[in-house]
Structure formats: C-alpha cells, structure tokens
Amino acid sequence: MSAVLNLNRGNQHRQYTPTLAEHWDDLVGWEARLEREGHFYARLLKAHGCRKVVDVATGTGVNAVGLAQAGFEVTATDGSENMLAKAQENAAAYGVSFADSRVADWLTLDETLGTEQFDAIVCLGNSFTHLFDHEDRRQALRAFHRVLRPSGMLVIDQRNYDTMLDHGYRSKHEICYTGDGVDVGPVELTPRLAKFEYRFPNGAVFQLNMYPLRQDYLTHLLEDAGFINAERFGDLQRPYDRREVDFVQQVAFKTP
C-alpha cells in the first residue's frame, strides 16, 4: 500500500510514519506475496509486451522489487518519503535496483514523470482507496492515462468493499497482506469510510483511513478517464465470485 502525497486532502501520507513503515513488511509477508502475486503480475505485463513500468504505490516495495526481479525497468514512486526509503532498502537487500525513485503526487503524476513515458502503471495494495474525493480520483486516473504510452496498461487493485459493505468483513488472508501474527480488520465501516486497524505481535497498533470503492464504480472511473477494455480478476483469477474474493484487480488500457 502506498501513501498519497495529498497535502490538502486529509494528509493521508502522514499516516505512514517511520514506525509504521518499519512494521509494514511484517503485514505484507514478502516471501508469500512475491510467490503468489509476483508471478501473476509479471506474466500479465509480459503478455502485453510491457518493459518500462512505474509502480505508483510502491509502499515498502514488494511489487516494485518483484517486477525488477522479473526483468522490468521499474520506476518506484510513492507519496511517503518514509515508505519509499524503506522500499529502497528492501530493493538493495533483494539485489535489485530501480531505474528511478521519487516522491510523487498522483494528481500531477504526468508533470513529475512526463507524458507517454511508460508501458504500464501498477497501483496495488489497495492504495487507490486513499483518495476520498470523486474529482481527485478522476484527476489522478487522467494523470495516469497521460503518463502511459499508446496501448499502455494500468493495473489497479482494491479490497472487495462490495462484500464488506453488503455482507460484512471477512478475509482469507491469502492475498496482498500475507504476514503471520498481524490482526487486521475494520473498526469503522460506512459507505464513505473504511477505518482499518492493524495489530502487530509486539503490541504496536496502527489505524488507516480508506474510501470503500465499489468494483463497478472503479470501472466507471477508468472508462471516464479514457481507458478501454477494462477487465477484472478476483484474487488473481477469473472468472470469480464477486462475493467470495478478498481483492479485485482491474486491468485497463490506453487507446493505441
């Protein structure tokens, strides 16, 4: 998960303190996540001929590192200096490096990275749900669109908030956050707020606020931003049961 550099929109990036950044890898569970997710995203990007990739939600780096290990030229961006610093440490520990690494605001991503620079954007770890304003989401996705080359692809994921809102929270703890001994769950859940609490074995407790995006709404946002041919996976598979999966991955493309 990333923090959004969003100084006037709730200071979301300030939730990611150095202390939380140090704990975050225990929640992610790197080895299990790289084994299950890394191969999926690498295959997906390679199948569409992608080479130059920007991870716009780098967090502590698990997906960026996995893609670098798979041979992609990866630019790592995040809204939190603390998380990005930890990602650089993790990349070095795994023997890879990023083509570039910088703090970036999603809403002005094209100003930071330039237009038509990348074959693919990945925005993973439920990160896009940090944006609480509809117009901010539209602006961010339009900036993503401008950063991509023609025919470029965007891969974005989220928790299955549809099930959470309609039927209550449950999780198999097999996707995205696979670490052992971390208790995760919502302490407040409304159509406009999902406040999650993370309890670690050493007694540390953190809370993060997210917006509970519904699947169809996100697809609409993608199409509104100019993306085409949007398709979905549930827990990295398709077809999928909309009620049973923990995470939903959406893939969409810029026009050729």
Image (spheres, helix red, strand yellow):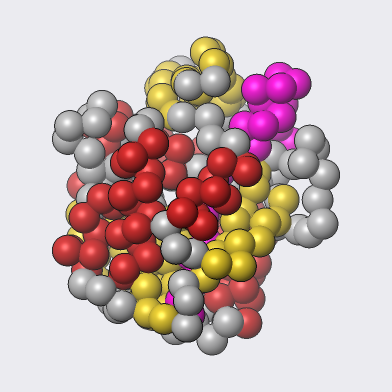
Measured as percent of width and height from the top left, residue 180 is found at 62, 36
Q: Is residue 160 magenta?
A: yes
Q: Residue at x 77, y 41 (%)?
A: 242
Residue 214 seen: yes
Q: Residue at x 67, y 56 (%)?
A: 232
Q: Nearer the viewer, residue 160 or 85?
A: 160
Measured as percent of width and height from the top left, residue 115 is found at 25, 74
The residue lying furthest to the top in this view is: 188
- Give residue 177's quadrant in the image: top right
Query: In the image, is 190 to the left or to the right of 240?
Result: left
Query: In the image, is 79 to the left or to the right of 121?
Result: left
Q: Nearer the viewer, residue 215 or 54?
A: 215
* Up-down relation of residue 2 to residue 67 (above or below): above
Q: Nearer the viewer, residue 63 or 51?
A: 51
Q: Residue at x 62, y 32 (%)?
A: 161
For the N terminus, the image quarter is top left
- The total of numbered circles placed on residues is 0
Q: Is residue 250 magenta?
A: no
- Give residue 167's quadrant in the image: top right
Residue 56 seen: no
Q: Which residues are the magenta region? A: 151-173
- Give residue 169's quadrant in the image: top right
Q: Residue at x 63, y 76 (%)?
A: 43
Measured as percent of width and height from the top left, residue 4 is found at 30, 42
Query: In the image, is 188 to the left or to the right of 92?
Result: right
Query: In the image, is 29 to the left or to the right of 80?
Result: right
